[in-house]
Image (spheres, grey):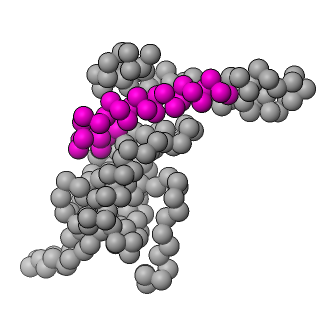
Amino acid sequence: MSNKSIKPLRSGSLSPEYALLGFLIAGQDHGYNLHQQILNELGWVWHLSQSQAYTILKRLEYQGDVSTRLVEQAKHPDRQMLKITAQGRRRFMRWLKEETAQNARAIRLEFLTRLYFSNRYTPSDTRAIFNSQYETISKNLERLERLRQELPDNQTYNLLSLDLRVRQLIIIREWMTEIGVRLNIPKEATR
């Protein structure tokens, strides 16, 4: 695959690239091992094939977030050792503190990934990350409930759409309350 065919990931798209970067924070590793870590630690969060992992790692290398070096092996084919760069580390740490979009898919993928790596690398920030997300969901829920009240009854499909979004956020907030208990985040933080 030539570098010209690798396109940078657009901002805001849901990709396991930050999970791969996150595992590289712990130290250099091979692509196969990184894929196995995702399967073992976040396999129900990210459904990632080995070829997808290699494609993402290649893109991260092209973007300057990962560097590679060839490791010769006597009885096996040579392997590429991957290492996160200073740029990749900064990018990952910045992402770790960003808010997650307010939809079920983004919460399942990005928010859980953020919590996982926050707990792993910056446990003192986990509470703040959790509380910020919980508060954002609560405010968005209140906003949507107000909008729902203001819509006239003849706006059937708009009402149905808002009803669904409100119910999703209610469920996400309840689920986050359970997460707060599991991760031992104080109750006042989860209302």
The picture places residue 56, in percent across and down from the top left corner, at: 40, 65
Question: What secondary structure characterizes most of the magenta part?
Answer: helix
Observer-nearest residue: 134 or 24? 134
The picture places residue 17, in percent across and down from the top left corner, at: 39, 58
Residue at image location 24% in from the left, 41% down from the top? 122
Residue 17 in the magenta stretch? The answer is no
Left or right, residue 164 beside residue 91: right
Left or right, residue 4 beside residue 183: right
Count of numbered tags = 0
Q: Quadrant of residue 117?
A: top left
Q: Quadrant of residue 25?
A: bottom left
Task: Give the residue at the far right of this rendering.
Answer: 154
Residue at image location 36% in from the left, 58% down from the top? 91
Observer-nearest residue: 172 or 49? 172
Residue 136 in the magenta stretch? The answer is yes
- Give the magenta-colored segment's residue range: 115-144
The picture places residue 133, in percent across and down from the top left corner, at: 46, 33
Task: Give the residue at the far left of this rendering.
Answer: 74
State the quadrant of the C terminus.
top left
Residue at image location 38% in from the left, 62% down from the top? 53
Please, is residue 142 above or below residue 1 in the view? above
The picture places residue 168, in percent across and down from the top left corner, at: 60, 29
